[in-house]
Every structure is written in structure tokens, then in C-alpha cells.
Amino acid sequence: MRIRKRLQMELKDVKNITFPKPSIEEWKEAAEASLKGKRVEKLKTNTYEGIALYPLYTEKAESTEKVAELPGFFPFTRGTSPTGYHDKPWLAVQPVSGITAEEANEKMRAAFKRGQNVVAYPARLLSGGARAETLFKEIPLKEIPVFIDLKGKQKELFPQFKAVAEAQNTQLTGVIAEDPIAEWLICGQLPEDTDNYFADWLKTIQDYQKVGSDLKTVLINTAVYHNGGANAVQEIAYGLSAAVQYLLEGQKQGLSIAAVSEKIVFSFAVDSNYFMSIAKLRAARRLWAGLAEAYDTASDHFKMTIHAVTSELTETLYDQHVNILRTTNQAFAAAIGGIQYLQIHPFTHATGETDEFSERIARNTHLILKEETNITTVVDPAGGSWYVEQLTDELAEKAWAKFLEIDAAGGILELIKQGTLQKEIAEVYQGRVQNAAFRKESIIGTNVYPNPADKIKTTTKDKHVSYMKVAKPVGITPLELERVSSQFEQIRLRSEKFKGISGTAPTIGLINLINLKSYKPRADFVQSLAAAGGIETIGSKGCQTVEEAIDYVAATKLPIYCLCGSDGDYSELAPVIIKEIKKQFPEITIYSAGKQQEELEITLREAGVKDFIHVKMNAISILLELLQKLGVN
């Protein structure tokens, strides 16, 4: 009894314990202690959007003055529905294809039994009236919405959709749309007379109301900008500018702003920058809603409908199963960001070939997110996160400034004609490529932790195809769409081709010094770097003497070697070994692993080292240099 009372008292005391709230300065002191003398400001990073990311976010002093935003209410930053996904979860948009229309139809009907809830076909499958009839056979369009990006075929395919709707005696729902501006960018052509083009296109938009009064028929495909390399600020600003262009064209044809805005659906790409993707969707909704005031239109007409699609920019050919992790992370960010439609690319998407298994994994990702994460039970899970809220505010501010800049320059079409938009996106893409080359950004399985045993088929995927037919075209600079990983993949494919012809992979030797503890860190680094380019390595056991190193080189007879060891080993043993190797084998090239102090670097270069392979060098450059010396074309 006495023990029980004592325990009860202790529990009571525990419940009443309070802890002092640490100040920011105290937190900084504790953080800097763990950083071993470095200032906490060193933890700040900068994004492609020009936004500084800090290690700690707290409630801003002015946040109490800010008007509270609620889910389902203007400006819809926190979502367009007050109940989130509770009443209506996002729709799974997983396009199916097939060699024949019959096969595609069978696949689609099978997908409905496994979680698919939208009819989605690639535009290329829709050609010929009989084909459309087959594609939609036994699919109850009265109950199931459609999501198809027609990629320039909107006018051509209207009779088919009309026939399908009449055959089922129903109104179509969902999205049957296209984005002419995005298609022009892909195909590198603009109509000579854009006014006449838009007048004809908007008549087609109105025709589609006959087959579905609630259909979304105008697509703002910002994913095209993203897959060209654009940052989040550009993606939002270009998307808003394209939407405003369509609103203005609608006004010219006598349509109200509300009539056009309600037909618009935005398609955003979500990449592996998790929090930036969430903030991008939130900021875009806020800015789109803000345009309602500019057009003196009720805000309900500017509730943004969002289709999110996983990034093609971040996909890889090698170590394809890592794409499952990427797309799951991206899809999770999209769901947190509050979207209506979600499309997850299969993990083999970069090759242009998908199969039943990869499509199943992509489709099941929707189900896992819906059923096992409780996302659908929480309205706006990101709400109240100081980091996400501040990121949203900064992104919205920068995107709006960019939008106004585009407007002042004459609108998005003027930027495209001048090539300014393409140039701006290309500059950001080159920054991404450079960061991947210097491995400031890790692409798992490609520029870091590559699997040397992984082999791929030559990609069969076509460049992004547009079906847009432009009468009297005017040439413009097309928007180049390429994955960031492609530079590493092309090098590795060259190595595989060389191995297929010669029978052996391009190989370099590692002269490892003293013992495993000394050489392993740098040997592992060089081995991983070489593997990223499809180059194999043969390493010696720890060479204790000059003679052992010479014997290793004589036995392996390779054109290139890299010295691996500790700094102390380099000072004591490396110069002698290098001089003797160069004396006996003057034709070989020797590198050294690790960046050295200036004095030791000079000594090693004088001994015969060509260059130093280290973490701060351009991996692409050194891989190309190695392949050239190994005779790989």
C-alpha cells in the first residue's frame, strides 16, 4: 500500500512537471556546439527558386496579424473543400495503353477492379471512330469520369466523344482537355495567326459542352515547364500567365471570365523536393483565387482544380526500383498539397515501356496513401506547419512578382516568341545538371550508390510528342525536355556498348596503400564514381612497399591507375611509388584519390600524378576523360 501511494505521488508530480521554454539563442548555442565551432548559419541552403531554407522555423511575430485561412474558403490556400478528402478523395489517373483498342479497353476495365476510378488513355490511342467506340466499350461513363490530355487532337476527336456520349445516353464528366501553348512549345511552332486559332479553338471548347456541361476542357500543363527544368516559381508564374491568356482570348469571343475559368484544370508536376512541392500547390491555389478580384468575378469561379503528376525530370533508367521511392514521396506531397487528380508514373516510365507489374505498383501507391496514411481523415495535414506556411508565403510572393513581370513584357506568348521563356528554363535546368555533375544533388543509383550489375535495355521512349497541327506555322525555339540523370546514363550506356563489342568493360586499377583502414574510404569513393560511368575497378591489396605496387601494375597491365590511401601514406610512400611506376611504365596514367594540400599536390604532380579525383570535382568531366583514355568512343 505504501509503495502504491508513493508511485501515485510520483506520477502526479510527473504530470505537473513543466520545462522552461528555450530561447532561439539557447537553441543556436546547442546547435553550434554539435557543429564543432561552425556557425548555425552554415546550415542555411538556397533553392532553385532563390529561397533560403533555414534549419529552424518558428511562429512569425506578424502571424497573429495575418487573417486566418480556412480549408474550403478564399483564398483556398488550404484546399478548395472544407472537409478535405473526407467526402471526396483524389481520383487515381493511371493511363493504360495497349497494342489494340480491345487490349486497352480490357486493361482499363481490369484496372477499375483494382482501385482505378478514372478513365485515362494516352491521346495516341484515340484515332478513328470505331477505335473510340471500342476503347469505351462497357465502361459506364455515367458513373466514371474521364481524364485525357488530347495534346492537340481536341477538335479532331470531338465527334468521337459525341458519339460515345450519345451511345451511352449520358453527359461526360471529368477532364477532356488540351493546352495549346504547351503543345506549341513542345513542337517548336506557333500559328502565324494566333487570334484565328484561339477563336476556332474556343468554339471547340463550347462544342464539348454538348457532351458534358461539367467537363473541364482547358488544360494548363505546367508539368511541361517543370520537365524542361523550371523551378517552382517559374512553373506557377508561367501557368498563371497561360491561364490568363486563355481568359483574355475567351473574352474576345464574347465568353465571360467565369465561363472560361470554370473549364480550366491545372496540371502540376511534383518532384522529390517534398516541402517545396506542397508549398507550390498551396501558393498556386492562392494566386489563382486572387485573380478573381482582378477580374471582378466571384472567387468560387477561381477554385483551382489540380491534376498532379509525378516528375519525369527526376526519373532514372538505372536502378529503376528507386523510382518507386521517388514517386511515392512525390505522390504523398501531392496528396498533402490538396489535389483532385493524381497520376503516378510506373517505375519503368523513363524507358517508354511499362508492364503489368510496374503499372500495378503505381496504381497501388494510391491505395496505400489513401488507406494506410490517414491522409483522408485529416483536413489540410500541412496546415500550421511554420516551415510550410512560410515557404508558401515566399513562393507565392516570388511567383506573383514573376507573373507581373511576364504581364509587363506582353504576356506568355511574347516571351515564347522571343525565346525568353525557353532560355530562363534552360538556365535553371543547367543548374540542376551542374549540381548533379558535382554531386551536390544525389541521384540514388545513378550519380551515387550505382549498382554495377544493373543493366538496361536501350530506351525506347520517344521525345515528348505533340499532335498539334499548326496551319502556317512560325518557328520558335522548342522547349527541351530531358531528365537530369541522362548525362550519367549516356556515359554508362557508352561503357556498356564498349563491353558488348570488346567483351570486357572499361577498367581502371586502384593502387591501395598500406592497409584496409587506410585506403578503404578513398577506394570506395573512386569505385562508386567509376561505376556511375560503367567503369569497373580492380584494386590491389594494401601495398606496403614499392615492389608490391610495381608487381600489381605489372600483373594487371591497365592503362589507368588511381592511388588510394590516407594523407599520411601519400606523404611517406606515394611519391616514391609513382616515380618508380612511371619509370617502368611511362605510358600509363596515374590519378590520386582525394584533394591534397598545395605542397603535397605539387610533390605528387612532379612525381607523375596527372590529376586528383575528389568529391568537389565535376564527375561528368572526369568520367568522360577516363573513357577517352580507355578508348571508349
Image: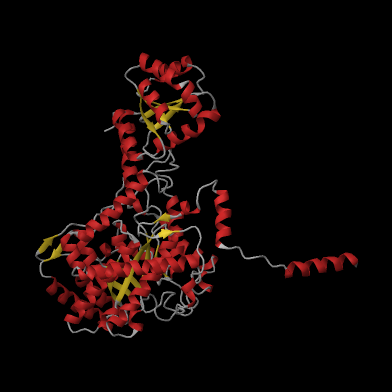
- Residues 21 and 176: in front is 21
Furthest-left residue in this view: 472
**Residue depicted at 28% across the width and 85% down the height:** 296
x and y, in percent, of residue 218 in the image: 27, 74
- Residues 150 and 487: in front is 487
Quarter occupied by the C terminus: top left
Give the answer, above or below, for where 554 lies relative to 396: above
**Residue depicted at 47% across the width and 14% down the height:** 547
Q: Tell me: 436 left or right of 367.
A: left
Q: Tell me: 365 left or right of 29.
A: left
**Residue depicted at 50% across the width and 17% down the height:** 545
x and y, in percent, of residue 5 in the image: 86, 68
Task: Decide if residue 76 is in sight here.
Answer: yes
Q: Tell me: 258 left or right of 546.
A: left
x and y, in percent, of residue 172 in the image: 32, 78
What is the tally of numbered marks visible in this picture? 0
Give the answer, above or below, for where 50 lies relative to 509: below
x and y, in percent, of residue 336 in the image: 46, 68
**Residue depicted at 85% across the width and 66% down the height:** 6
Furthest-front residue in this view: 25
Give the answer, above or below, for where 531 lies relative to 170: above
Q: How is the image coloured?
A: secondary structure
Q: Tell me: 211 left or right of 62.
A: left
Quarter occupied by the N terminus: bottom right
Quadrant assignment, res 183: bottom left
Task: Decide if residue 360 is in sight here.
Answer: no
Quadrant assignment, res 339: bottom left
